[in-house]
Image: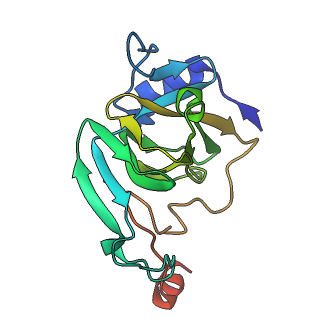
Amino acid sequence: MSIMPDHWIRDESKNNQMIEPFHEKQKGQGIISYGLSSYGYDARLADEFMIFTNVDNAIVDPKNFDESSFVERKTDVCIIPPNSFALCRTVEYFKIPDDVLVICLGKSTYARCGLIVNVTPLEPGWEGQVTLEISNTTPLPAKVYANEGICQFLFYKGDSPCEVTYAARAGNYMGQKGVTLPRLKTSSDDEEAA
């Protein structure tokens, strides 16, 4: 498995729409940078946010997630409360090839401010806008900026395609658009995918 360079990312994006919209060069004058880098792609943060709140003293349960635990905002600057988090998404839509695994890393500009970006790997055959979680680990409110860089995706090409892609498995988050909350498959979903 090898990490893929800028020219491969560019070719896949131009020929196979792997990343849309695609920015061929890093843009970063006066903003947090985004676009193609040497061995990755820095994605932008969209202007849709779901900010965690505990107004109703809810319990966080990934098997029975209560959407009322979030306040929705559409804004150019999101303020994440101290010791809290926000769900958001990338501007870009990704279509991952069947022999590629993508890893996400948060931008160091945000990490140096105590803001941590988390996303699971983008699996072979997956496509959609990426839902991100940004944790504010500080005791202070923190800003994040829409339409600027938020994280970098690294592309690893396998020696051969996997036997079962995310698309073939009919994964929970296939083709997602917008910020997507936790989902579980039902037993009937498993039977249909088999």
Single out the residue that lies furthest toward the front: 139
For the residue pair 46 and 140, the one nearer the viewer reads as 140
Q: Can residue 22 be seen in this view?
A: yes
Question: Can residue 177 be seen from the camera position used here?
Answer: no
Please state which of residues 44 and 68 is positioned toward the viewer in this rendering: 68
Please count the marks in the image. 0
Quarter of the image holding residue 32? top left
- State the residue at coordinates (45%, 36%): 18
Quarter of the C terminus within the rendering: bottom right
Where the N terminus falls, by quadrant?
top right
Q: Which residue lies furthest to the top in this view?
A: 29
* Residue at the image point whose x is 38% and y is 12% from the top: 30
Q: In which quarter of the image is residue 44?
A: top left
Indicate whether 78 appears above or below 13.
below
Q: Nearer the viewer, residue 157 or 137?
A: 137
Identify which residue is drawn at 62% across, 34% down.
Answer: 154
What x and y, as percent, mark residue 17?
40, 34
Q: Which colour scheme is used?
A: rainbow
From the top left corner, tell me how far across and down residue 14 is, in percent.
Answer: 41, 25
What residue sits 50% from the left and 61% below the top? 167
Give the camera-side residue of 115 and 182. 115
Left or right: 136 in relation to 160: left
152 to 31, vertically: above or below: below
Whether 117 is drawn above or below 180: the answer is above
Image side of residue 53 versus residue 122, left or right: left
Residue 116: x and y in percent read 57, 44
Q: Which residue lies furthest to the left in this view?
A: 74
